[in-house]
Amino acid sequence: MLFNSCLNCCFLFAGWLYFWVKKQTSSNKRVEEIGKLVRKGANTLLRKEYKILAIFSGVVAVILFLFLPSPIWKGKFGPNLIMALSYIAGTVFSATAGKIGIQVSTIANVKSAEAAKNGLKPSFMAGFRGGAIMGMAVVGGSLLGVSAVMLVTGDTTALLGFSFGASSLALFAKAGGGIFTKTADISANLVGKVELGIPEDDPPNPAVIADNVGDNVGDCAGMGADLFDSNVASMAAALVMGVAIDKATNSSVNAAMVFCFAALGLVASIIGVATARIGKHGNPTRALNSGTYSTTLIYIVLTAVATYVFDFNWRIWAACIIGLLVGVIIGITSDYFTNDNKKPVQFVAKASNSGPAFTVLSGVSYGMLSVLPELIGIAVAALAAFKLCAPIG
């Protein structure tokens, strides 16, 4: 009951956000015209990608059917068929996530650009809520897909096939769009700006439109598929462990805990997105960080209440919170190394005055340094969670 209610709220909220963004003012015909060109090109590129990926997915599905979990000539073909169908389902869900990303981004881009004429606040809200649509729909879809596979098959091996399907499509969707946009960007700069003297990112240059098409496919459709893949993979890993512990202890509480915590994550995200605000002259980074912190706090409280009510294991809850807090810390360190108000970016800008070599060296150095806190945080979180939960099962 709780799980279904959370899913319904997620999709309803995503629908409300979509119509809110869509009804925002868009009176500039030139912006609308360019937006339509980008939307048409993005859908064309995505359709071409998906045709090729459908063939690839079909071949992989046949290979899975023949060989996994075991060669069909050595036993029953039922588990192999389930694995192949789960893989196909993963690719379909992931493709849907990419399509949602394109549909939303090409509308939100126009609305956010138009809203920017009226100030930072309306532009931020249009862009933020546009991105939240994809987040809600994709995470809700991944939760729906995982629960459907587990409900139909009751087998975590099939769930791994579903996760593999999501991964394979996300990889190529993101890489394909990225390669396309980088090629178009280079063409726009070399031919348009250098040879013909057309200003950078000027819409009359067709390569600029192509560059924006690739950006939407790689960074929006690809990101949607990637987000779907990441969420499915994390849930699959948790369910594999949860089901294994349940079998050892003859219970079902740990698998239920995974779905419960995932559903409550949706609730916390809905509250965080709905309450996110920015002042007229506010800082977008500060507004995003505040939303992250409030959502994290809400999630901690909701999962603690659920752990108490449903008698879940408090040590598993604590391990979950450790991972959550480390994720927040990673976000803070990423912001520190990429925010132009912080010293690393300012130092790189200062080094640029001495020439391109210093720009590259300082930028690469700070880039390498930026991953150190993340690596330490992940290692500490993994060790702490293991030590905390080692006796379970």
Image (spheres, rainbow, N blue to C red):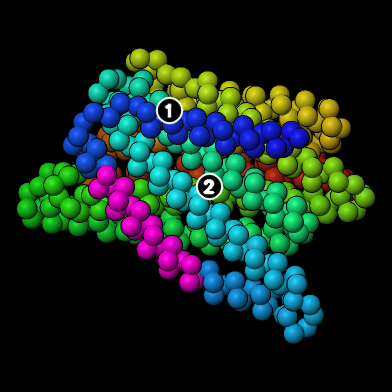
Q: Residue at x 54, y 41 (%)?
A: 137
| Residue receiving disc 1 | 20
Name the amino acid type tagged 2.
Leu
Is residue 43 rendered magenta in the image?
Answer: yes
Which picture quadrant has residue 308? top right
Q: Residue at x 58, y 42 (%)?
A: 139
Give the SS element for disc 1. Answer: helix
Is residue 191 rendered magenta in the image?
Answer: no
Instruction: Note whether residue 177 is visible.
Output: no
Q: Main secondary structure of the magenta part?
A: helix
Callout 1: 10 Å neighbours few (<14), some, many (20+)? Answer: few
Q: Is residue 147 left or right of residue 391?
A: left
First-in-chain label (1 vs 2) = 1
Gap between marks 1 and 2, in whole Å?
23 Å
Asked if the residue at tag 2 contacts the one at tag 1, i.e. Cβ–Cβ closer than 8 Å, the answer is no
Taking depth in this image into account, of 23 and 115 the one nearest to the observer is 23
Q: Is residue 43 left or right of residue 67?
A: left
Name the amino acid type tagged 1.
Trp
Q: Is residue 173 above or below residue 329?
A: below
Q: Is residue 369 left or right of residue 233?
A: left
Estimate the x, y position of residue 176 in percent, counting from the top left: 39, 60
| Residue receiving disc 2 | 227
Segment tinted magenta in the rendering: 36-56
Which circle marks residue 12 in the picture? none
